[in-house]
Image (cartoon, rainbow, N blue to C red):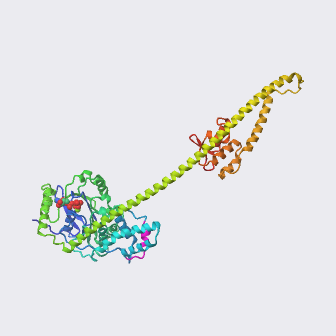
Amino acid sequence: MEPLGDYLMTKILLGYEIGTGNEVHMENHHTVVTGMTQLSGKTTTLEALVHRGKVKAIAFLTKRGEGGFRGQREIPAYFKEQRKGRLIDWQYVEAILEATMGERMKFERSWIIKVCKGAGSLEEVYQNIITEQKTARGLHESIYTNLGAYFEIILPEISKYQFADKIKLSKGFNVMNLIGVSDEMQQLIIESTLSYVLQKERDTVVIIPEAHKFVPQGKKTPVKATALRLIREGAAINNYLWIDTQETTSVDKAVLKQCSNWIMGYQQERNEVANVRENIGRRKIKEEDIMTLKIGHFIASLQQEIHHVYVLPASLEKNIGKLVAMGEMTVREVKDGLAMRDKETIRLTPKQNVSLETKEIRSGFTKDQEKVEDYLRSEKERDLTRKLETLQEEFGEYKESTENQERVYRESIDGLQEQDKKLTGELSKSTLRADLLMEKLVRYEVFEDALSTFLKPLIPESSVKVDEKTLERLIDKKINALLAKRRRKIEPEGETGMPWVDMWLPKLKKPVERKIVRLLAEKLGVSLTKDQIALATGYTVTGGTFNGAMSTLKNKYKLIKQDGDKYSIMESPP
Ligand SMILES: Nc1ncnc2c1ncn2[C@@H]1O[C@H](COP(=O)(O)OP(=O)(O)OP(=O)(O)O)[C@@H](O)[C@H]1O
Ligand SMILES: [Mg+2]
């Protein structure tokens, strides 16, 4: 068996070049390891790097069924509320709430700022919420109630556990086991650990698990802001982030940009492949290069240089790595070998590192996690019921207003029909009178004819000759003058209720125009057909006077508008 030997502190043996079996080393720096779950070997790679690089690394176990980092040195979870000076920072609280609720808190920001004022702990922020809630009304009250409810999820989590107030690190792995701890609390613990490293440690690697969850793109989490600070300020004192994720598309872009090592394993999801290629340079690798990788095989872009490597798992002899890289041994053989070894370790060392106390805490964590999940579920249900009630209320209001409107329309239709009946009555009376007059006229004409026949021989010839046509014209003129006088007399007066129409009326030359405008202004909001307008104004619907006036008012003055076969007054002056 060939010993692993010592490797340079900053140069870590990553694996063996495919085809040649040459060693590939990696400079310790901010690193991202990505690839499809279970089919790439991310955790195995990170384990191997910590082991071979002899680095001081902090890792977190966050998901059930996680096979990696087991049997490594465990350290107690560390948590300290983030403060600015001696006070709680409102941005920290906002990030906690956003991560808890999975939604932006932009709307609630001013309330959050208010309750954070003067608070030295999250508990004090909660107390401020309760105080404000007592006197708040309406919207304020409901926002304080919501904020209070979020805190009632978070605070019991914090007070439940005994957290370490220091982190004691050794070379190699320092694993915080957070399995069973709620997502919110995992966020707070990882954030606290990053803050601690930022302030107190050097030459330390922090491995961020499931980075798409803890450092997501486009969402705030407690971890994100601190991770960004560490990635920007860390390199100068050899503090590095190693990022583990199967979804680089969902990881914060600013964080990814700082990673000079990209170790990419098997991936089938095309968007993922495209994103990975985008980040290391499109032309450097092809889509198929990533989509055909086997377990433990990676394309590594190390400080811009591309290598195709087989990563040797921790504590295996060097020549195994070389053999696999050169195709003389299969990954399957190594994988099966590893599985056998793990079984043995489990049998020989039955979880020595897990004390009884830790076990109890873990089962406590699980129960509380279930309680929190139940609470969240019922909160979601309540939220949905509230939304449904608001919708029902809105629908009721809408229905009522539609019904009101319908009533108004029906009333105005009734009014119009009544008016129509009245006018029809008047019209038939007038027709009757016209018939009578016509009869009288005929009689008069007959009488006139008879009289003239009788008188003509008796009257001497007049010297002034008036022909019949001139006489007719004179009579017509006289009749028109008399009619106009009469119409003027019956033209209604007074205000229409539309000031701009009242100003317009005197400007209209023809009485018919004034009548039409006045009628439509008084019926604001109601449209009438030509027949109805002619009837109400006393003109013949087919007559030139009426039609001329309608088109002048519509096209020239733009005082009335047409919609289908209906007309109405304009809402505002032309
Ligand atoms: N280089 C390797 N050689 C042989 N087997 C490997 C190698 N890397 C990983 N494996 C095996 O593949 C399986 C998955 O590995 P690992 O847990 O590291 O994957 P992962 O990418 O971290 O998965 P997840 O996304 O689910 O965390 C394990 O059984 C592991 O032993
Ligand atoms: Mg893993």
Secondary structure mostly seen in the magenta stretch: helix
In terms of image quadrants, where is residue 49? bottom left
Q: Nearer the viewer, residue 101 or 20?
A: 101
Q: Nearer the viewer, residue 267 or 141?
A: 141
- Residue 480: say if magenta: no
Q: Residue at x 38, y 59 (%)?
A: 384
* Side of 464 where 423 appears, left or right: left
In terms of image quadrants, where is residue 251? bottom left
Ligand 1 - quadrant of the structure image:
bottom left
Q: Can the viewer see residue 16? A: no
Q: Position of residue 35 (x, y in %)?
A: 25, 58
Q: Nearer the viewer, residue 463 or 219?
A: 463
Q: Nearer the viewer, residue 335 or 540?
A: 540
In terms of image quadrants, where is residue 2? bottom left
* Side of 546 where 165 appears, left or right: left
* Side of 175 where 97 appears, left or right: right
Q: Can the viewer see residue 352? A: yes
**Residue range (magenta):** 108-120
The residue lying furthest to the left in this view is 1
Q: Position of residue 268 (x, y in %)?
A: 25, 53
Q: Residue at x 73, y 41 (%)?
A: 487
Q: Residue at x 23, y 72 (%)?
A: 361
- Residue 111: say if magenta: yes
Location of the N terminus (image quadrant): bottom left
Q: Position of residue 388 (x, y in %)?
A: 41, 57
